[in-house]
Amino acid sequence: MASRDLRDALGGHLPEGFHFGDVLGMRRTKAIAGEACFEIEIGPEHLNRHGSVHGGVLMAMLDTAGLWTISDPDDEAAPKAVTVSLNCSFVGRSEAGDSSIRATGRISKQGRRTYFASIVAESQPSGQLVATGQGVYSKIA
C-alpha cells in the first residue's frame, strides 16, 4: 500500500511516531549504550499455520533490536540509520506457556557510518532461544 493510501486508511494522517513495530505490538523494554531490547506479547496474529511464532515476526524483531543498538538510551526518537543486511537463523520454538518474545541486540563493531549488531530472540518466560541474527546498519544524516 502506498503511503498516501495508508494515510487515507488512517483518516488522512499517520500518527506521530507510527512505525511498523506498532503493527506487531513491539515495545522497547531496555536501552543502554550499545544494546537494545524489544518485546511482543504473543497473540494469534503472530502465529503461523503450525502455531509457532511466524518467522517474519521474529525477523522484524531481530532487525528492530539490531537497528536500535545505536540509539541514545535516554531518547525515544528512532535511530537515524537503515538496515543494509540482515541474516537470520531460526533455531527453536516457544515452549508451552510462553507468552512473549524478547529480542536483544548488541553492537559488535562500529565504524563512522556503519555498525554491526548481533541479535538473539528468546521466548519468555522459558528463555528458549528461537532465532539468532547478525545485522549491518548504516547511519544516515
Image (cartoon, helix red, strand yellow):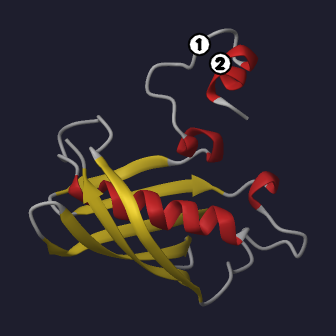
Query: In the rendering, at what x and y percent does residue 78 appear?
Result: 33, 40
Q: Name the residue under label 1.
A: 13
Identify which amino acid the numbered label 1 is placed on.
His
Residue at position x 33%, y 71% in the image: 136
Coordinates of residue 81 in the picture (x, y in percent): 30, 50
Residue of label 2: 7
Whole-percent x and y of residue 137?
A: 31, 63
The quarter of the rendered structure image containing the C terminus is: top left
The disc label shown at residue 56, or none:
none
Mark-to-mark CA distance, 1 and 2: 5 Å
- Please report contact status of discs 1 and 2: CB closer than 8 Å, yes or no: yes
Q: What count of labels does the image hold?
A: 2
**Left of 46 or right of it: where is 57?**
left
**Can residue 99 be seen at all in this image of the molecule?**
no
Q: Residue furthest left?
A: 112
* Quarter of the figure with residue 52: bottom right
- Assess disc 1: are there few (<14), some (14-19) or many (≥20) residues with their C-alpha within 10 Å of its C-alpha: few
Task: Classify 133 as above or below 32.
Answer: below
| Residue sticking out furthest to the right | 49
Give residue 1's position: percent from left, percent from top.
73, 35
Can residue 87 be seen? yes
- Using residue 64 as the reference point, say whether residue 25 is left or right of it: right
| Image vertical order of residue 92 relative to residue 43, above or below | below
Which numbered disc, 1 or 2, marks the residue that appears first in the sequence?
2
Query: Residue 68 is drawn in which quadrant?
Result: bottom left
